[in-house]
Image: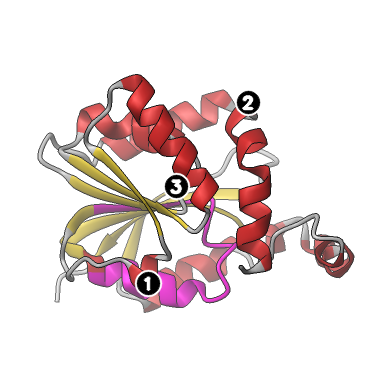
Amino acid sequence: MSQDKAFWDRIARKYAQDPIADQASYEHKLEKTREHFTPDSRVLEYGCGTGSTALLHAPHVREIVATDLSDEMIRIGKERAAEAGVGNVHFTACDVADLAEPDGSFDVVLALNVLHLVPDRQAAMRISHDLLKPGGVFITSTACLGDSMAFIGLIKPVMRLFKAWPDFQIFKEARLVEELQACGFETEYRFRPAKSPVAFLISRKRNA
């Protein structure tokens, strides 16, 4: 078991109980995301955590495939879906690269609070691009620590040594947008709350 998977398994129950830090911004992101849904949409969310966002979106789409590396996160997501009587969110514990779905399977792909946690985000972007239908939408919410919190890299090795943090990458929002473009996306919407490192981006797959 990798250190990061073990970390997320260990904190999953606490993570599930933590309140949302900025409810107004979260509601805004939900609203903007739903502008790209139809009742027939097929949606992928990878790095779904305990499934809170997927379950909120479920009434607005046909199906959501929700994945996470953490077995414990997925277990909690399944429990929540059963308790809420939600049947169109399908949880699976896997890496997005291992998802058994053909190219062009999804209308929308969500990567929320995850791209800064993956070791190769460009690869994740390319996979997202391939899984989307032409003109499909990739929606991301990403901590861009390089814009205002680059200093955190100084203490990262110590926190990793004591298994207190998962691994994460430090980069700026401008770089993220450039990488999205290089992977075949055009970013159509950007939102970032004041004093927040988290950039919310809505990007569309360019037609070939």
Label 1 crowd bin: few (<14), some (14–19), many (20+), radius 10 Å = few
User: Looking at the image, which is closer to me, 155 or 65?
Assistant: 65
Horizontally, residue 46 falls left or right of residue 148, namely left
Q: Which residue is drawn at 67% across and 34% down?
A: 14
Specify whether residue 117 is painted magenta.
yes
The circle on residue 48 is 3
Residues under numbered marks 3 and 1 in contact, where contact means CB atoms less than 8 Å apart = no
Identify the image's colour scheme: rainbow, by chain, secondary structure or one colour.
Answer: secondary structure
- Disc 3 residue type (three-letter): Cys
Specify whether residue 96 is painted magenta.
no
Residue that carries the numbered disc 2 in the rendered image: 19
| Separation of residues labelled 2 and 3 (CA atoms) | 16 Å
Residue that carries the numbered disc 1 in the rendered image: 97
Q: Earlier in the sequence, mark 3 or mark 1?
A: 3
Picture quadrant where residue 88 is located: top left
Picture quadrant where residue 124 is located: bottom left
- Which quadrant of the rendered structure holds the C terminus? bottom left
Residue 31 visible in the snapshot = no
- Which quadrant of the rendered structure holds the N terminus? bottom right
Q: Which residue is drawn at 80% across and 65% down?
A: 160
User: Looking at the image, which is closer to me, 89 or 124?
Assistant: 89
Expressed as whole percent of the image width and height from the top left, the position of residue 143 reads 61, 54
**Over which residues does the magenta segment extend?**
108-130
Q: Earlier in the sequence, mark 2 or mark 3?
A: 2
- Disc 2 residue type (three-letter): Pro
Secondary structure beneath label 3: loop
Secondary structure beneath label 1: helix
